[in-house]
Image: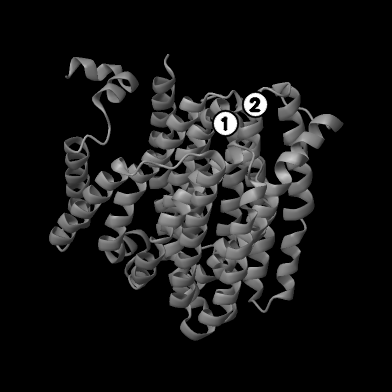
Amino acid sequence: MSEVRKIAHNTAWQLGGKIFSTALGLIAVAIMTRTLGVEKFGWYSTAVGFLQFIGIFTDFGFTVVTANMLSEPAHDKKQLLNNLFTWRVITALLTQGLAPLTIFFFPYPAAIKWAVVIMAFSFVSISLNQVFVAYYQTKLAMHIQAIGEVIGRVVLVAGLALAALGNYGFLPMMIAITVSSFAYTGYLWFRAEPLRFQINSNISKAIYKKIWPVALAVVFNCFYLQGDRLILPLFVSQTEVGLYGASYRVIDIVLAVSTMIIGILLPLITFAYSRNLREKFVEQSQRAFDLMALFILPIIAGALVLAEPIMRFVAGSDFSSSGKFLQIQILTMVGISFGIVSGHINLAINRQKSALWVYIVCAILSVIAYLIFIPKFGGFGAAWTRVGSEIFAGAGLTIAAGIFSGFWPRLGAFAKILISSAVMGYAVYIIQPFNLFASIIIGIFVYSILVLVFRVISKQTLLEAFPFLNKLM
């Protein structure tokens, strides 16, 4: 099987799994919003925002570092995986197991504090997933991850449905979320090759050398990526937090697509660079940039036009006004998506330390802006500050990657995708009052036709990736 076909096979599994798991995730959000209402969903958003802040703060970059190191020829893969897994377990238990107890020092209702304690276990589980997901990325076996994610989402929807039907209330729903995380992690662990706890001094030193600049970048990244969710509940009502948080759930779904795309290609970028395959490195980096644009730009265009209908469909009529937050927050995906690509390129070429200034400056400016604009403008101040910080970070990382790697993305395909997305967005805007699903279907149709007309994807790439198309062409 050729490299392109392997990528296509891997991508197909991920896309299929992501579509199904996303549908289940939307059902889960729909159950929660309609059962809890705006204020109690604000409780959930506050609790999750607090835990995600801690989760990112103590992430240490294990996913990208694991994928990166497993793609390099320096160490025995089995021992390396054992050591990475061991250190992730230790760091997760010490940080994400204990840090959530600080929630009791915040002026939140008791239900929010206990929700944090309950869901903290799910975040420990999610931390372990980082090593497994990176392992399957390097093996181009992401179908296992896709199946595991679907299993977790099925358990989640079932648990939330039982809690809603039984009218059990807020905290049982938080328990259902934690159980679903255990189901996801359990499957990934079961399908992986046997792991054991192991600490090798030489390998541990190599991990530390690779991970500390990434970890430091992630710490600063945490402040501008999640600072809004930590600071906002201190200045506005839980109702406004609920509206803001509902739009955040949609952003999280789009962000998962971005992470999936670069996760497919990072091992190949690292493999090419670590073996001095310059042309292959440039090819894979350009492919990552183009794929990100291909998927993200039309999503942004569609969300700008359909924000309020999307939120009504996802969360119910009580959350229609959160569409205004979604229209602003979807713009963050411009900076996030291309920042993800450039940040991973910096990691692949071992220049992550040289890009730390981007995260440090962005974190400092973002926290200052959050503290200025959130008290004055509430959720809108938080949303626009986050847009500015993400675009600043994305631009800075792209410049850093270009300087250090010599790779500057060609913008020909990007321009075609941007035009196609804009035309699609205008077409969707014209027929928006008709029906949400009709708008989406027409938008997909218009965008697909324009992508083919502009030849964004070559016929040769399509035929190599999907050989069955030979019979149709």
- What residue do we see at 59% from left, 67% from top? 227
**Residue closest to the far right:** 201
Can residue 258 be seen in the rendering of this structure?
yes
- What residue do we see at 34% from left, 68% from top? 323
Q: On the image, which quarter does residue 427 sit in?
A: bottom left
Q: On the image, which quarter does residue 349 sit in?
A: top right
Q: On the image, which quarter does residue 197 sit in?
A: top right
Image disc number at residue 376: none
Q: Which residue is mark 2?
A: 72
Residue 365 versus residue 18: which sits nearer the camera? 365
Image disc number at residue 270: 1
Relative horizontal placement of residue 319, taking residue 285 as reference (left or right): left
- What residue do we see at 55% from left, 58% from top? 173
Q: Dot 1, how many residues are within 10 Å of its Cα: few (below 14), some (14-19), or many (20+)?
A: many
On the image, the x and y values in percent for residue 127 come to 66, 45
Which of the marked residues, 1 or 2, is nearer the chain's N terminus? 2
On the image, the x and y values in percent for residue 11 come to 41, 31
Cα gap from disc 1 to disc 2, whole angstroms: 7 Å
Residue 130 versus residue 80: which sits nearer the camera? 80
On the image, the x and y values in percent for residue 428 come to 18, 56
